[in-house]
Amino acid sequence: MTPRPPIFISAVSKELRSARQLVANTLQFLGYQPLWQDIFGMEQGDLRAMLRLQVDQCQGVVQLVGQSYGAEPPTPDEEFGRVSYTQYEALYGRKRGKKVWYLFIDETFPIDAHEAEPGEVRELQDAYRRRLQADSHLYHPLTSSEGLEAGVLKLRDDLSRLRRGVKQWAVGVVALLVVITGLVLWIVHGQRNQTGLIQKQGEEVTVLVDRYQKMQQALVRLADVEAQSKQPGAKLTPEEQRANAYAILEKELGLPAGSLVKDLPGLALELYSRADTSSLLRARAAYALGKFDEAQKLSLAAAAEDVKAYETAQRVQQDRRKSAIEGYKLAGQSAQKLIQYNEAMLHFREAEKLTDRAGDPKLWVEVQEAIADLLYDQGHYKEAEDTLGPVVQTRTQLSGPEDPAALKSRNRLTYARWKQGKLVEAEAEFRELLKVEEKVLGREHPDTLVSRNGLAGIFNEQGRYPEAETEFRLILKLREKALGPEDRETLKSRFNVAIALANQGKYAEAEALFRETIKLFEKVLGPEDPNTLMGGIGLASVLNGEGNYAGSETQYRKMIKLYEKVLGPEHPDTLSYRTLLADALINQNKFAEVEAQCRDVIRLEEKVLGHEHPETLRTRAELVLALNKQRKYAESEAECREVIKLEEKVLGPETVDTLTSRQFLANALYGQGKNAEAEAQFRDIIRLEEKALGPEHPYTLDACYDFASGLQRQGKLQEAKDLAQRAAEGARKVLGSDNPETKRYEKLWQELEPEKAALPRGGML
């Protein structure tokens, strides 16, 4: 095996030890053996003879020209005058005819912390730097560790020629010996083969280096791309987020499809295991390997190192500040993956302290978007909106209103408004976004389809189910064309179409589509993939809507058991679907079981998500319903008032969740005979739902039904009959005549019909 050609690395140890190690790693990757000599100024005697021996055995010298002078010989050099040992290494190398490459370290480069040098030697180093700048030899001004690594990689052509020269010299010696034996033709042939082999090896090294660089770029950007590719509100699994990020990075970096899933874990494991890997890069490697606890710890350690260096340095080091921000941000993203939301926010806020909106707006918006994404996961939609507003403004100022990044931020802002119940405003914004995205990105672009999906979701929330179905079918068609019929995103669109069908009471069609979609999910992703399980949850919901309550319960329990296996018993999705199971249990009059189930889920959700998270509040509202069904009205009222207070604070007074909880409260008041207060609640609820959702929205109709039931118990039969009729006719129109809700409303209406004839006898008008 051919030995690695040695290359001497010259640098002042106290200032550039970390930078030198990075250069050494890169040279090793390129196939060279790095050598250097640590000198700290405390050594006794003259070290020049030792340095000459070191340089003489090397094929070239790479010098990192920093700001520090370093240690110097006890007497000036006879040939070079007063020079430091580091300067002597390069000067002696040039004298001996060695190739010397100068990598010029800029003042903003993240150097190692060290004591300041006396002004005299600093002036000597400044003079040395100026001579190099005026010299004909090439130098590279570098401001970051990434730039330094790239600078060394750019030398690979020179290094290859150096290696080729060494090999050609060796071949020449052999050729001379062979000429003596008369085998000249054989040597010429051998030289041609060797030259071709060297050229081929050089090309292979170039390809390998390029691929390595791209893999490192993918590793550095992975956490950010995962966060940016996550659609607001979408319940993406870690595997889905990783797959989406890999696809985006492969496209942007020009890597073959599937190369990251195949090669990046290996690179990450190598970097994670190496002793010379920097803390931040090891943190990124841990993140790529799914070691989020370790990534969080390493990121914080790296950030603390950078903050300390940044705060104690004699001059501003912007790269250190940027590196600290990246460390805190990665720590936050790692904690967010672990659903440690409070810890994640602390890390993001530390990063925020180091950002400057005016000085570095690009970095500022990246941190703000990370904060907004976390606020969204926490259910703090108003705070997310407040955070994203300035982000959109800044991105627009930076790149214009049609910049894809600005459009993506607008999309996130619109989702935050939607979640606060600002449906009209969100619909208008989604429509405006679609116009711009279709113009700039194209109709089939993933970002465009995210906005269209948001618009369809608005229709669904407003009870405009036929319009929602139309939009979801269009998205399905576009994704089938752009991505293929079995792509993960295409299958999700099929799921959304099935939901829209179920919401219209088209249960047979919805059930068939759910079962078909589940089979495709199982084929493409496997039977335990969270998407497959979500399809199973959808099927359970349809069975419940059809009135097959026992079948729905069985399906829910089957899916929840798998969710507990795949995601864990305390994962937010697992807990959310346990709450959905309550619907099937309530329809079977298993009220005590629902109460016990809800209390257990609430305990876990308060632990994992917090007591103010919307998911926690929804489960508490389900508990109120179970208490009402058991006629525990006083307990229900107390619980409900607390839930409403939190919902009004977190979500707003006019959102669906808040109004639904108020409806449960009104029923609890009726149960205690507090009729006037209950009646006032219902009138206000219906007024607000008509305003926010429309007069024929299913939630509005359900409130009419409950109000009619309460009025019936009070003997206010005419108004009760009118409301029951409105609920029944509206449900027949919106949900269909076969829908169980429609039939329930019609039953009450029919019960009240005979009372109409008896009204005159009771003296009522």
Image (cartoon, rainbow, N blue to C red):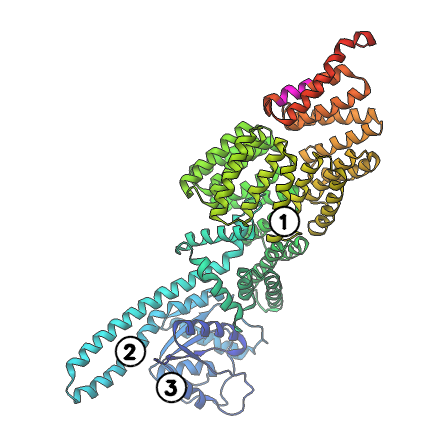
Quick check: is 729 in the magenta stretch? yes
Could you tell me residue 199's position as x and y percent? 28, 70
Could you tell me residue 395's position as x and y percent? 52, 46
Q: Quadrant of the N terminus?
A: bottom left
Could you tell me residue 573's position as x and y percent? 63, 47
Residue 196 quadrant: bottom left
Q: Which amino acid type is marked by label 2?
A: Gly
Q: What is the span of residues highlighted in magenta in the rendered image? A: 725-731
Q: Quadrant of the C terminus?
A: top right
Q: Which amino acid type is marked by label 1?
A: Lys
Position of 167 with respect to 105 (left or right) is: left
The residue to which callout 3 is attached is 56
Could you tell me residue 309's position as x and y percent? 60, 68
The residue to which callout 2 is attached is 165
In front of the other: 48 or 540? 540
Quick check: is 80 in the magenta stretch? no
The residue to which callout 1 is attached is 561
Residue farthest to the bottom, as pictured: 45
Q: Residues within 10 Å of mark 2 (few under 14, many from 20)?
A: few
